[in-house]
Amino acid sequence: MATENASNTAEQSFDYVVVGGGSAGCTIASRLSESGQYNVCLLEAGGTHKSPLVTIPFNLAVTVSRGVKNWNFETTPQVGLNGRKGFQPRGKALGGSSSINAMIYIRGVKEDYDSWAALGNKGWSYDEVLPYFKKAEDHVAGETDIHGVGGPLTVSPVRSPNPLNDVFIRAAEEAQIPLNTDFNTGSQEGAGYYELTQRNGERCSAARAYLDPAEGRKNLTVFQNAYVERVILAGKKATGVQASIGNKSQRINAAREVIVCAGALQSPQVLLLSGIGAPDKLTPHGISVAHDLPGVGENLHDHPDYALLYKTSSSDAIGANTRSGLKIMWDSIQYKLRRRGMLTTNFNESGAFFYTDRSEPSPDIQLHFAISIVDSHGRKIHRYHGYTCHVCVLRPKSRGNLTLTNADPQTHPQIDPAILAHDDDMETMVRGVMKAQQIMEGPAFDSIRGEPLYGSGLKDRDALIEDIRNRADTIYHPVGTCKMGQDDMAVVDEQLKVKGVDGLRVADASIMPIVISGNTNAPSIMIGEKCAAMILEEARAGKNPLSLAS
């Protein structure tokens, strides 16, 4: 694998060009190149994943909240958040958001994927996508009917569990939420420890999982610091991309296909910059309409999140103070010697799924329990010790959109996820928060619980709603902006091909017609696995031209 920042030539050619080195992009580039039959190019706007800021799990506290290896997007003012702008951190490095996320491995539930299939997306039912989850996975706890071993992505138990997690799980059981030892068996309901994408106490990002084993491949070229400006079209066929690589403009030709994997916030941006989208999103910015596709940038939705924050007397919690600092220094030695201790934490080591409405097909609320105070995405620092319970609405009805700010590829787009815009989302959130309060105020926490912060302990419904609107935001799962489907607003078909354009696919969380019930990294990698398999199957069937490597 050649890793490059720029080339001396103004034009290069490959069989496949992959735009975006995130969860799906790394997966696709690796799978397309592993046979040696095809020349593959991967373009990533960020830099390396081989940094302690990425590999040490604890450092997500820096990358997410302090903007390191992070695009640091903001939303437009959100009506459902009392006019506040939301924060949308997305990974800017090889591995994409898998290089800065909390590493939680959740697939969602059977009903999620069966609902995709019911929308006309043949091949996307749960039973049909399960083999791709298993293909990706190296499950440390062993192989089962639903877990795989030997795949690139290591899925591990929490390495050095913080004792506060056991308090949380006990409190959840006191609130009649059962114990669940594996949220990926098909039944999510319950409380327990999450499994993490970690390998021996280090982050196992998509780049580590899929690109590191490919380093010896001469047929895979990876460009870092590469900003894709547009997809190049010859009529209704994609023939490559124009990219700024190391401040040099280059044309990267694709003899077979361009696969856009820039994520839910940037894949639609790339299409719009290429003249693919609704005319009213293009012409105001001086972009000619190459292909009228009205769904590009529509259907944006995300999991809304509200945090219950509590001070604590427990020394197990992490705070920005001398006591925690000394513990981190000691644990740094443990980490260096044995890859154990506090530096292995993802902060959200345990959680729960529960119903607020039993008519729902599966739990409609997810909790992430954090062993520190996570205030405003960790951007507001507290010196005292505390803990956090994130309350997430799993199947929001609110829908927003994404549009261009201008025609400059390096300008952030206008992001409107319409968080808590639908009344039903607020109603579900309120019910979820009240149940979470019951857990956090249960007997298990009595000996260590300090005062609640903000409105965390509010019982008045109207006051609670106001606090939710004042402090809620995203839990980092934007999806849907290039949705897969058969209706007029669908952007890609079930093969992930952009409708009406040859040689162009989109493969990442943007294709999800409906967000899955949980964290979106594992499903994004599954999408990459399935997309690569579909491309290779077409190539074997002779539906593409001869390879440049043949």
Image: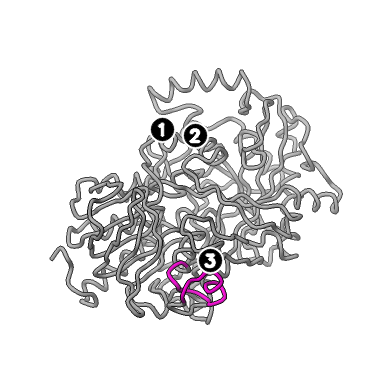
Decide: few, some or many residues near mark 2? Use Cα within 10 Å; few <14, some 14-19, many ≥20: some
- Which kind of residue does numbered mark 1 sit on? Pro
How far apart in space, not on screen, are marks 3 and 2 (Cα)? 29 Å
Horizontally, is 237 left or right of 366 in the view? left
Question: Circle 3 is placed at which residue position?
Answer: 480
- Mark on residue 52? 1
Distance, label 3 to label 1, CA atoms, is: 32 Å
Q: Secondary structure at mark 2?
A: helix
Q: Position of residue 509 (x, y in %)?
A: 48, 61
Name the image quarter holding residue 393: bottom right
Q: Earlier in the sequence, mark 3 or mark 1?
A: 1
Crowding near the residue tagged with mark 1, few <14, some 14–19, many ≥20 C-alpha atoms within 10 Å: few
- Say which amino acid is labelled 2: Asn
> Mark 3 or mark 2, which has the lower sequence index?
2
Give above or below for 240 relative to 327: below
Q: Is residue 194 visible?
A: yes
**On the picture, is 326 further left or further right than 2?**
right
